[in-house]
Amino acid sequence: MEVGGVFALSTTRELAVADRIAKMVPAAELVRFSNSGTEAVMAALRLARAHTGREQYLLVEGGYHGLFDAAMWMANVEDWKPGSNDDPEMVPYGKGIPPTVKQLAHLVPMNDMQRLEDMFKRHGDKLAAMLIEPIQGNCCAIMARVEYVQLARRLCDQYGVMLIIDEVKSGFRVGKGGIQGLMGVVPDITTFAKAVGNGYPIALVAGREEVMRSFRYGGASHGGTYTAHSVSLAAAEECLRILDETPALETLAGHGKSLMAGISRILDARGIVHSYTGHPSMFGLFFDAVPPDNYRAWKTSDYTFYDTMAGYLHDLGIIVEPDSREPWFMCEAHGLDASCLSDTLAAVERAVDLTVEELAETK
């Protein structure tokens, strides 16, 4: 902070952080910095269009890629009949999204191999990119099956489509190389944010050198006054060093496993059926024997118990998302403090009992 934040020129710390990322993530042959996850995904889609010369793109239902017009499309499950042969209508998140943008976007359900193949057969030669969160950070941590992501990789290769893996939420949280590293799938373009700088505003778009070189004069434009801000880069440099060189991620995942085991003991003792989705470092709690594997399955399920319990958890000092769309996020500090686990589980037990009482009264 003493030397300033914005210089309008590159700094050596940019290279240090990019080198660390390239070491940790095989897909990150070249790296460019942004300020937020939204900006990084916007740049990634623009890059894919510039590289392929195409305009259309494919989204996965339940995925979240930031607040910009191209990404703000969802499946209208409320007005959809489960079991029908028709797909839910694709609708914008809210007002202000031009309907003309819809002509470029397509949606597929997660983990449906046949629907994915059919989509590429119909539109593959017009697609610039497929965007996917293998762990859906805004949808209960629903996780793509490895074979689904592998199929996406093969289809993208077959049709000349850029595979963009969005790791804004999962990146540097579930593993040093992100969820793509755990799945063994290398995207053409990848995005990271949030955990890169441990809360400081920084994001990045990275990918194959051949693709990333499309960011150039006369090619895809990218930049911004505050990109690669020196304070955020300093935070990223130290945060990534810790994640790369210490057991921080193992500590975090271990805490998640202990927390899930403790919650299960509480629920099992009361005969409450439940399951988990996602990864121990960002898991979703689901009150059914089998967790959902796509957005439609979650949206048409009953999540009353979770939503009610979340309110009680807030009152007891445990801050979780007040609905079941968001995973349980933790940090290494939770795993380093033994009292954190016991205090959390004590609150969960009380919240579960209060929820049981409330729902029994409303029947």
Image: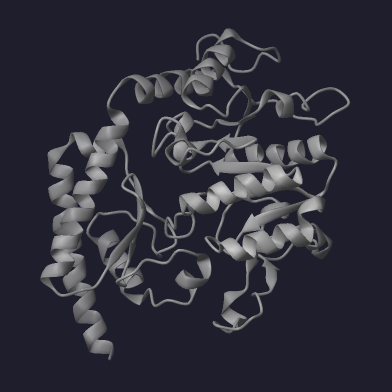
The answer, for residue 108, to whether it is visible in the render is no
Picture coordinates of residue 161 (x, y %)?
73, 44
- Residue at image position (53%, 36%) is 193
The answer, for residue 210, to whether it is visible in the render is yes
- Residue at image position (82%, 48%) is 55
Q: Is residue 167 left or right of residue 189?
A: left
Q: Is residue 282 above or below residue 333?
A: below
Picture coordinates of residue 326 (x, y %)?
43, 57
In the current view of this chain or complex, which residue is farthest to the bottom? 363
Picture coordinates of residue 270 (x, y %)?
13, 73
Picture coordinates of residue 319 (x, y %)?
32, 54
From the image, which quarter does the C terminus lie in? bottom left
In the current view of this chain or complex, which residue is farthest to the right? 218
Q: Is residue 5 above or below residue 300?
A: above
Q: Is residue 157 above or below residue 311?
A: above
- Residue at image position (42%, 55%) is 141
Depth check, front residue: 120 or 165: 120
Q: Quadrant of residue 267?
A: bottom left
What is the basis of the colouring in this image? one colour
Q: Is residue 148 left or right of residue 126?
A: left
- Residue at image position (72%, 45%) is 158
Q: Is residue 235 left or right of residue 362?
A: right
Q: Is residue 196 left or right of residue 242?
A: right
Q: How many marks?
A: 0
Q: Quadrant of residue 76?
A: bottom right
